Amino acid sequence: MKALVIYDSTYGNTEKIARAIAAGLSARALRSGEVKPEDMQGLDFLVVGSPTHGGRATPELQKVLNDIPSDSLKNVKITAFDTRISGKDKGFGVRLITKAFGYAAGRIAKTLEEKGGTIVAEPQGFIVDKNEGPLKAGEIERATAWGKELLTK
Ligand SMILES: Cc1cc2nc3c(=O)[nH]c(=O)nc-3n(C[C@H](O)[C@H](O)[C@H](O)COP(=O)(O)O)c2cc1C
């Protein structure tokens, strides 16, 4: 099975999660700027993740999504993830944005689905304590376990 994890990361937390998912799924992990067209050829499973910025993926990650040709994910299993700040740690501004716009993972999954992919697992959010991290305790282990679970889909 050819599986790929594509991610973006500003402060490194999403990268850690992406690498943990990739380890569980026996996949490669590529940062958004590193993805070449041939990496997308013959894929069976594509997992895409981003830090949540204003309820969305980063512009770099969104560019990768936009560049995926229509219908090219037919027969590709897909899901998505993001990193985000947990409700109780959010400042007032981020709380308002979340209420209005939600999180990145669901949007990423929807775009992958629009490109022909089949969602096989609920998109996941992994929690950071603050903008720069660190990740909440146990999130890296949860990411590896989720990657392993994806192998069974
Ligand atoms: C410009 C900016 C916008 C953000 N907007 C949100 C948001 O809407 N919701 C949220 O939960 N966290 C938000 N955050 C916190 C990020 O989710 C957090 O920085 C990210 O998960 C860390 O991942 P990284 O280390 O891979 O960059 C924002 C952070 C930045 C820098």
Image (cartoon, helix red, strand yellow):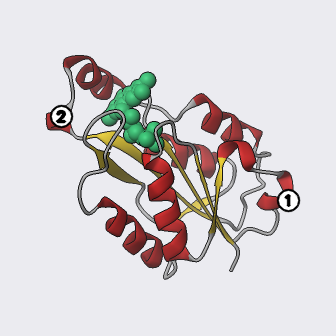
Query: Horizontal and vertical percent for residue 33?
Result: 71, 42
Instruction: Answer with left or right where residue 24 lies relative to residue 60.
Output: left
Q: Is residue 89 visible?
A: yes
Image coords of residue 133 (percent x, y):
33, 41
Q: Nearer the viewer, residue 127 or 45?
A: 127
Distance from mark 1 CB to nearest ligand 1 atom below 8 Å: no
> What is the crowding at mark 2: few (fewer than 14 residues within 10 Å), some, or many (at least 20)?
few
The answer to whether 152 is drawn above or below residue 137 in the figure is below
Vertical comparison of 81 with 149: above or below: above
Q: Position of residue 72 (x, y in %)?
A: 78, 55
* Residue 88 in the image, given as x and y percentages of width and height: 14, 36
- In the picture as drawn, the residue positioned furthest to the top comes out as 93
- The residue that appears at 73% across and 68% down in the rendered structure is 43
Horizontally, residue 132 falls left or right of residue 58, namely: left
Front tag of 1 and 2: 2
Residue type marked 2? Asp
Q: Are marks 1 and 2 in contact (CB under 8 Å)?
A: no
**Residue type indicated by callout 1:** Glu
Count of numbered badges drawn on the protein: 2
Task: Look at mark 2 in the image and give the residue it sits on.
Answer: 89
Left or right: 86 as drawn, with respect to 139: left
Q: Kindly identify the residue that appears in the image at 36 percent across and 36 percent down.
A: 132
User: In which of the image's four quarters is ligand 1 placed?
Assistant: top left
Q: Which quarter of the image is occupied by the N terminus?
A: bottom right
State the residue at coordinates (39%, 65%): 143
User: Label 1 vs label 2: CA separation?
Assistant: 41 Å
Q: Of 116 and 36, which appears nearest the observer? A: 36
For mark 1, what is the residue?
A: 38
Could you tell me which secondary element the residue under label 2 belongs to?
helix
